[in-house]
Image (cartoon, grey):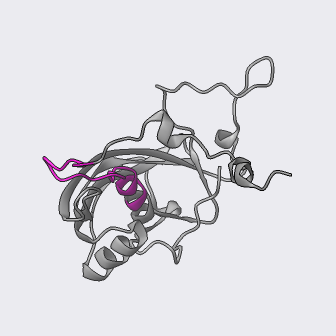
């Protein structure tokens, strides 16, 4: 796991949270990207435009040393259709449930089985993210979860690849490199 670095220059949407100010009672936080942040996210995600990104989060302590952030992120963006290159409007609705622990914390230890192998439950909770320093960037977390929800191959409804026929096995056969030698002069 890589530690989260606060206020990363690569992330245009940032909301730093001081870990020392987080109490056991979760605090509700509403985040909304401004115009400059939306443009930065569009460049980062390589989409035509991001018109909205909002999140409603609950931030609280987790087992004394950790931080638990849960909530919901929603957004709207415009992508190019992979078939027609026409604009496609995409809506993002994603739940967030992330735990952070300080580097070196007892909670950051990875549990292994008797063979010293890491055991992961694919349906179970994710491993906690590590952070260093005294700040966690909740905006970066929101941007990451939104990015994971983006359709990598957006397609306009009804758009199809027309006129494309897959080649036959004969068409895909590589030419024999010695075929050019057959016409050589025979002595």
Residue 2 or residue 57, whichever sits in front: 2
Residue 16 or residue 3, whichever sits in front: 3
Question: Which secondary structure type mostly characterizes the magenta part of the structure?
Answer: loop
84 to 63, vertically: above or below: below
Expressed as whole percent of the image width and height from the top left, the position of residue 24 reads 43, 47
Residue 65 or residue 116, whichever sits in front: 116
Q: Is residue 119 magenta?
A: no
Is 104 on the left-hand or right-hand side of 84? right
Q: Does the magenta stretch include residue 145?
A: yes
Task: Please give the name of the residue rendered at 76% of the width and 55% of the height, measured from the top-left corner.
Answer: 184
Q: Which residue lies furthest to the top in this view?
A: 114
Count of residue discs: 0
Expressed as whole percent of the image width and height from the top left, the position of residue 3 reads 63, 58
Task: Please give the name of the residue rendered at 36% of the width and 71% of the height, measured from the top-left corner.
Answer: 41
What residue range appears in magenta?
143-163
Q: Residue furthest left?
A: 158
Q: Residue furthest bottom?
A: 36
113 to 101, vertically: above or below: above
Task: Please give the name of the residue rendered at 31% of the width and 78% of the height, measured from the top-left corner.
Answer: 39
Q: Which residue lies furthest to the right in this view?
A: 187
Q: Name the quadrant containing residue 78.
A: bottom left
Is 22 on the left-hand or right-hand side of 119? left
Expressed as whole percent of the image width and height from the top left, the position of residue 120 reads 60, 27
33 to 21, vertically: above or below: below
Residue 78 or residue 99, whichever sits in front: 78
Is 89 on the left-hand or right-hand side of 110? left
Task: Please give the name of the residue rendered at 29% of the width and 57% of the height, measured from the top-left corner.
Answer: 82
Q: Name the quadrant containing residue 48.
A: bottom left
Expressed as whole percent of the image width and height from the top left, the position of residue 165 reads 32, 43
């Amino acid at each position: 796991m890589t530690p989260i670095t606060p206020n990363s220059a690569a992330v245009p949407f940032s909301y730093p949270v001081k870990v020392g100010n987080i109490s056991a009672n979760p605090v509700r936080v509403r985040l909304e990207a401004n115009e400059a942040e939306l443009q930065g996210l569009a460049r980062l995600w390589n989409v035509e435009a991001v018109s909205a990104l909002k999140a409603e989060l609950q931030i609280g302590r987790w087992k004394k040393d950790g931080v638990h952030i849960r909530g919901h992120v929603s957004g709207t963006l415009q992508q190019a259709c992979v078939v027609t290159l026409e604009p496609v409007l995409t809506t993002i609705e994603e739940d967030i449930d992330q735990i952070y622990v300080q580097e070196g914390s007892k909670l950051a230890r990875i549990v292994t089985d008797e063979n010293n192998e890491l055991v992961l439950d694919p349906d179970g909770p994710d491993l906690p993210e590590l952070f260093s320093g005294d700040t966690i960037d909740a905006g970066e977390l929101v941007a990451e979860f939104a990015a994971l929800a983006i359709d990598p191959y957006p397609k306009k409804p009804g758009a199809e690849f027309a006129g494309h026929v897959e080649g036959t096995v004969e068409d895909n056969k590589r030419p024999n490199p010695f075929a050019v030698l057959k016409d050589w002069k025979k002595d």
